[in-house]
Each structure stands twice: as C-alpha cells, then as structure tokens.
Amino acid sequence: MASQGRDLRRFVEFGRKIIGVGKNYRPNGSPQQPPPAQDPLIFLKPTSTYLSPGEKIKIPVGRDQIYHEVELGVVIGKTGKTITESQAMEHVGGYALALDMTDFDLITEKNEAIKVTYPWALAKGFDTATPVSEFIPKSAITDPNDVHLWLKVDGETKQDGNTQDMIYKIPHLISFVSRYMTLEEGDLILTGTPEGGSPVKRASPTGRDTATACADYCGPSKPTHPTPGEDIHHTLPPGCDELHHEVELGVVISKTGVSIPESNAMDYVGGYALALDMTARDLQNKAKKLGQPWTLAKGFDTALPVSRFVSKTEIPEPDNVHIWLKVDGELKQDGNTRDMIFTIPYLISFISQSMTLEEGDLILTGTPEGVSEVKPGQTIACGLGDKVDMTFPVV
C-alpha cells in the first residue's frame, strides 16, 4: 500500500505516537481462546524513546536494571479514525521489530505484586526505551499472525514466541485504539510481548549483558490538539459517562536538553500556553483499580485543547499566574500557580532525568481545585489572568 506522500522507512522521524499493548500473549503452547471480555491494556510512549539499530540502551539514572520485551511493531500507513476490523489491515503500511524496555521497579514494588494507580510514563518513557529495527515492508510479512519472535541476552535465549499467540490480533487492536485516538501515518503500535521477559543490567567492563532480538522475517538485527473555538468532537469516548475539566498552565520547551539542573531550567522555557487536560474520569478510575495506565482516559482525540502560544515576556512571573475556568458562565476553578507543589524548574529538571525534553514539547503543570464534570451542550471558558483566554463548546 502506498503511503500518503511520506516515506514510511522514516517513520521514526515523523510518527507522532508509540502505542503499546500490555499482556497480549497467552503462554507458549496454551490453546487458543477467544479474546476476553475486557478491553486491551493500552499505554503510550514518547517518540523520543526511539533508538536506532547499533546504538546503546541506557538504563535511567539511579536504576540498576530494566526488563526487555521483544515485540512486533505495526507501522500505520494511512490516517484513520473509528476503523473497522474488516478494514484495519488497509491502514498497515509495514512493520518493525521493537523492544519495549521497561523499568518494572516503577510499576510494581520489588517482590510484591501490588496494583499501582499511576501512569507508566517514567517506567516506559525514558530515553532509549524503544529500540527499533529498520522499516519492514508489508510485503515482507505475508502473515503477521505467524511470525517467530525471539530474544537472547549474552547468547542465551530468553524469549521465544510466535505472534499466533497474541490474544488481541492486529485488526482488533487497530480498530479498538482508533475508537479513542486518531491513528496517523507513521504511528507505531507495539503489539505485546511473549513470555520470558527478564532483567538486563548495566554492561560490565567485559561488555556482557548485551541483548539481541529478532524475528524470522528480518534477518540480522539491525502523542491532534483542537484550537480555540473548535468543537470538541466525540468528547465522551467509548465507555465514558463522566468527563472532567482540568485547566492548566502549559510550559513550552524551546531547546533540547537532558539532565537539566534546576538552576538552568528556565533557560529551556520558550513560552507558555493555556491548556485543558480533559479526563474521562470513570475510565481513569477503572484503570486505577486495575493498576493500569491512564492512556484511554486522557489520550482520546480532542482531550487537550490549547490556546495560542504565550510568549515568555508576557508572563514574567510564571509562579504567580491567575488561572480560572467557567462552565456555562459559572466559576468552577479559580487558582494561582503559586500554589503548585512542584515548581516549573523542578519539574523540568526531574523529567529531564528520565527523558530528553525537546523543542516544542509541552509540560502540563497541574490543575487547581474545583475540577468538575461537563456534559455535551455545555460551554467551557478558561483563562490565564487577563493574558489569554479561550472558549470551547462541548458537543
């Protein structure tokens, strides 16, 4: 299938989303079963986690080990929304071998199978957390439901599976994800990993702890914002009956940096934006109970209305900005950024310890009290003092 004017071999450069699927393989050799009644476990990874073949995986500062998860990645070849399963494969442009490197110590306590109620951003979003192969044309994998995947660490086989053991097949995953968020050309869906994931540690002086991953087909191994005044379409994503507003000050990063000290953090701020973090609260609460990330609750289309860019000179004191929100003219949120627990310099420094902050990235700094539900037919108005405001009808 031809792409829409872009070379999919360069999907790493222009793709906007990495969409992960958790717990999607049945144990090797177990009988095939119909998909369970519950929905697939979906999470997001930033595209800054991509790592090209031959480059080094870096364990985050302060961590001793991370886990490998070898996966078949599906590269989206054309944009689509609410895609049917019968048409899903028409949106596949090709594939890639991928590793979903994960810091499980940030998901579960050591030796304790506890349920965690926070997103997995740091556990799966650190720099180099998504090594990928070169692009694999769709024609090179005639049957993506029968691909041998394997991974070795220092020559020892750790994972040895087949995509035929996936619980949710590729068409189902594409259809399900596209109900919540538009799939765009160059996006990558990680389809899950077979059993055998194990820890890898920092390389010793002898060079050990080297992972090699492959699939039989590959040979030698080698996150749309609406604008002010635009209708918030499909505000209630599938399964959601309770949508909440969260008005926030957004910080726009102006230059790339990693491990940024607090003392230099404001040098990386290029400006600001007024933002709404729209949240499907019932989906979020469900995810919390299951110890899952909040991707579907906060990642659906139109979930992040933003204002025009606000220059740094317009807000000389970002730690003293009045932030407010009204629903149908009634004041719901009325706060000030001086009440933030973690300051902007601290947030920039902390995040940059795990993932590279890049020019154009947006940090949402949190919301003041007063969060409440909104329904179709209502209108949201919000602002940053008298600097900028915006209005959104909910439809």
Image (cartoon, helix red, strand yellow):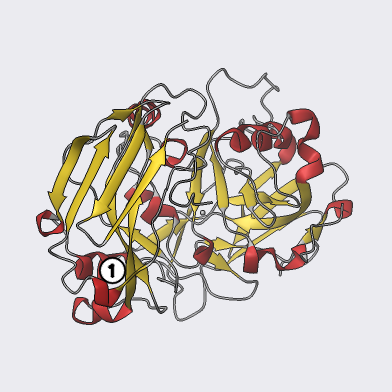
Q: As displayed, is residue 86 above or below residue 123? A: above
Q: Position of residue 231 (x, y in %)?
A: 49, 39
Q: Residue type at mark 1?
A: Ile
Q: Is residue 371 left or right of residue 214?
A: left
Evaluate whether residue 110 shows in this view.
no
Q: Nearer the viewer, residue 327 or 252?
A: 327
Q: Which residue is mark 1?
A: 348
Q: Position of residue 136 (x, y in %)?
A: 79, 59
Q: Quadrant of residue 27?
A: top right
Number of numbered labels in the structure image: 1
Q: How dense is the environment of label 1, judged by Cα within 10 Å: few (below 14), some, or many (20 and up)?
A: many
Q: Nearer the viewer, residue 334 or 196?
A: 334
Q: Quadrant of residue 295?
A: top left
Evaluate whether residue 253 shows in this view.
yes
Q: Position of residue 329 (x, y in %)?
A: 25, 35
Q: Secondary structure at mark 1?
A: helix
Q: As displayed, is residue 141 above or below residue 293? A: below
Q: As displayed, is residue 254 above or below residue 193? A: below
Question: Residue sitting at 62 percent across and 71 percent down?
Answer: 52
Q: Is residue 261 left or right of residue 6?
A: left
Q: Is residue 143 left or right of residue 99?
A: right
Q: Quadrant of residue 251?
A: bottom left
Q: Position of residue 83 (x, y in %)?
A: 70, 34
Question: Residue sitting at 37 percent across and 76 percent down?
Answer: 258
